């Protein structure tokens, strides 16, 4: 069973926000090695901001994020660099360089962080693109391929250095249902075949049910985690009315005041 192993990420008592705005307080959870772990919640709940804290882009107000035993919050210099080598990130937009081919985009981390020869780097870039179904598009510019293919190329680049953990921020954003389902299938296949741990931020219910081994659900009103576990069980068995409402895609109940105003 995926995710039955020991935690590869441990978040403890984390404070999440920006400037004077507090989004989350005293957040603690584990991500188990080899699982597809999904962070979900409503708009403005702090999903993507939490991810940025977990990968060290934003310093938290307090707390710790342990990546394979090492705290990314307090690490610096070579120790921080060693932690970052264990993770790969795909941002919501894909963030590919438009003037570079797909292969050149995937080559970038290898050129920056390894001493490999150019032909070795080219071979690895082509292999990574083949893993995501883009072996025939290595020489294409991002503008010449579809949005779904750009997302796949961004995943290939995130995998360039063979990280143990892949962070994906809203991978299905802007994709049609068929392309989104194909991307979900790719994520499942990579997780199972490569043994990579995935941390995925999304609010897309079909994707959540398709890929998630386990989820945490954030609530901006309560500034924390309101549910954790199998998304199907949360949908069917949660005792929290708002959690059931979210997973069953139900609107807010109409109040007497709102009904009278119509």
Image: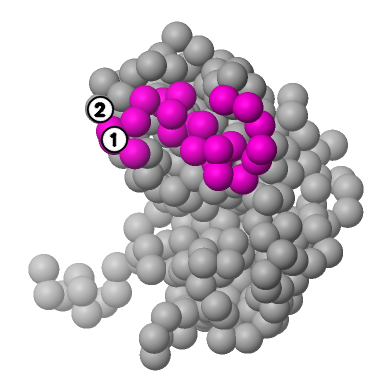
Would you place residue 100 above or below residue 94 in this image? Answer: above
Is residue 204 in view? Answer: no
Of callouts 2 and 1, the N-terminal one: 1
Q: Are marks 2 and 1 in contact (CB under 8 Å)?
A: yes
Residue at the spot 15% in from the left edge and 75% down from the top edge: 260
Residue 115 is a magenta residue = yes
Residue at the spot 39% in from the left edge and 90% down from the top edge: 20
Looking at the picture, how far across and down is residue 1, in whole percent? Answer: 84, 37
Q: Nearer the viewer, residue 150 or 43?
A: 150
Would you place residue 63 above or below residue 184 in this image? Answer: below
Residue picked out by circle 1: 98
The segment highlighted magenta reads 97-118
Q: Nearer the viewer, residue 104 or 67?
A: 104
Residue picked out by circle 2: 143
| Location of residue 3 (image quadrant) | top right
**In this rendering, would 65 be left or right of 154?**
right
Looking at the picture, how far across and down is residue 91, in whole percent? Answer: 44, 48
């Amino acid at each position: 069973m995926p995710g039955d192993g020991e935690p590869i990420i441990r978040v403890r008592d984390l404070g999440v926000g920006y400037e004077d705005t507090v989004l989350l307080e005293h957040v603690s959870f584990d991500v188990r090695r080899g699982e597809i772990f999904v962070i979900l919640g409503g708009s403005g709940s702090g999903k993507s901001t939490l991810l940025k804290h977990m990968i060290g882009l934003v310093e938290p107000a307090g707390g710790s994020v342990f990546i394979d035993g090492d705290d990314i919050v307090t690490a610096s210099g070579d120790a921080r660099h060693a932690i970052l080598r264990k993770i790969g990130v795909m941002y919501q937009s894909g963030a590919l360089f438009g003037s570079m081919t797909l292969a050149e985009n995937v080559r970038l981390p290898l050129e920056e962080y390894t001493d490999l020869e150019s032909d070795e780097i080219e071979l690895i870039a082509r292999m990574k693109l083949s893993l995501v179904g883009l072996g025939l598009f290595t020489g294409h510019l991002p503008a010449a391929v579809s949005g779904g293919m750009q997302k796949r190329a961004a995943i290939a680049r995130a995998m360039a250095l063979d990280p143990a953990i892949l962070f994906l921020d809203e991978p299905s954003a802007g994709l049609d249902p068929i392309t989104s389902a194909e991307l979900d299938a790719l994520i499942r296949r990579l997780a199972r075949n490569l043994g990579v741990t995935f941390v995925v931020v999304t609010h897309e219910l079909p994707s959540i049910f398709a890929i998630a081994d386990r989820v945490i659900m954030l609530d901006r009103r309560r500034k924390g985690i309101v549910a954790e576990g199998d998304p199907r069980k949360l949908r069917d068995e949660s005792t929290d009315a708002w959690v059931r409402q979210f997973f069953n895609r139900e609107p807010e109940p109409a109040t007497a005041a709102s009904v009278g105003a119509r």
